[in-house]
Amino acid sequence: MNPLSDAPGPAPTDDPATAGGPGGSGSGGGAGFGEGSGGGAGFAGYGPADGDESGRANRRWWDSDAAAYHGEHPLYLGEGAPEGDFVWCPEMLREEDVGLLGSAADLAGSDVLEIGCGSAPCSRWLAAHRPPRTLAAFDISRGMLNFARRPGMPEVALVQADAAAMPFRDGSFDIAFSVFGAVPFVADSAGLMRDVARVLRPGGRFIFSVTHPIRWCFPDDPGPAGLKAGIPYFHREPYVERDDSGEAVYVEHHRTMGDRVRELVAAGFVLEDVIEPEWPDGLDVEWGQWSPLRGAVIPGTAIFVARLGV
């Protein structure tokens, strides 16, 4: 799932084995914007974690954190209205304004899938304001999905599933999207890209937002300390938090910008755009590693826009 949290996170350090990188208080996963604990675990740093361990850890994390997450972050989750809100990133880029999925007419004739939807604020917004022909959304966490099933919510076909093994037939959708969702939380992200290609029809589109890969180099600190790079950009071991028993409780995987592009191309996609939203004037929110100070210097989000070859 993502990037935002007010958790303090580990103290900044130049040691990639223990630094508080984009995981923890800086990035989470699952729908809208997530958050690791950023501290308090038996271990927080970089180390191996396979696909099964990643899935177990993140399912438990989001199940246990769902209520607190929605209570702490109502702005980005559209908690002020039953239909939610479709916000692509902490820079407050809204689908209503940018139309990355297409026009209302385009969506009306499309079958759409949201990957790693959390409580589905984005899909709920689509259902209410730009309804597709069909709309499905899935997340690994039952706790998060329960927040999408509250009374008065727009109707969305919700499925509990792991993005590492999507339970959909080949060629089922015209558009797939993910907003700080499952992409960084799947160990085999190249396999995920292939599976997205599998469920899309020829010419189908895949749009997803993730923490900008350059943020991996910096500690999760919204202040000046967060502008000092100390973690190698090419260090690809995942960020892992473990409890006192050694069991992983949170896992997030890093890919460079080049990795993301190569994985998309290898899966058969044509990359149409990469959007790096600038921090907007007047946005004074400081949340986890996101802040006006850092946003003015380094990008926080990368949005990939791709189309499956025909």
Image (cartoon, helix red, strand yellow):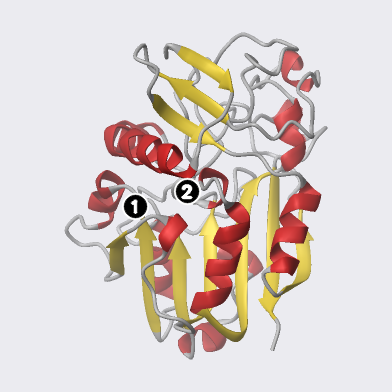
- In the displayed structure, 236 sits above or below 226; it is below
Q: Check disc 1 and report the residue beneath it.
A: 119
Q: Amino acid at mark 2?
A: Gly
Q: Check disc 2 and report the residue beneath it.
A: 32
Asked if the residue under mark 1 is in contact with the one under mark 2, i.e. CB atoms within 8 Å, the reply is yes
Question: Where does the image place residue 207, in percent across and percent down from the top left?
Answer: 62, 66
Q: Nearer the viewer, residue 38 or 256?
A: 256
Label 1 environment density (alpha carbons within 10 Å; few <14, some 14–19, many ≥20): many
What label does residue 5 carry, if any? none
Q: Nearer the viewer, residue 281 or 152?
A: 152
Tell me: 206 left or right of 294: left
Q: Residue at x 43, y 20 (%)?
A: 242
User: Which secondary structure lies at badge 1?
Assistant: loop
Whether residue 276 appears in this view of the structure is no
Q: Residue at x 42, y 48 (%)?
A: 77
* Total count of labels: 2
- In the displayed structure, 147 sits above or below 12; it is below
Question: Where does the image place residue 74, in percent across and percent down from the top left?
Answer: 40, 41
Label 2 environment density (alpha carbons within 10 Å; few <14, some 14–19, many ≥20): many
User: Which secondary structure lies at badge 2?
Assistant: loop
Q: CA gap, disc 2 to disc 1?
A: 8 Å
Q: Amino acid at mark 1?
A: Ser
Question: Where does the image place residue 23, in percent across and percent down from the top left?
Answer: 57, 30
Q: Quadrant of the C terminus?
A: bottom right
Tell me: 136 left or right of 195: left
Q: Quadrant of residue 305?
A: bottom right
Q: Residue at x 79, y 34 (%)?
A: 234
- In the displayed structure, 237 sits above or below 244; it is below
N-terminal label among 2 and 1 = 2
Whether residue 78 appears in this view of the structure is yes
Outermost residue, left side = 151
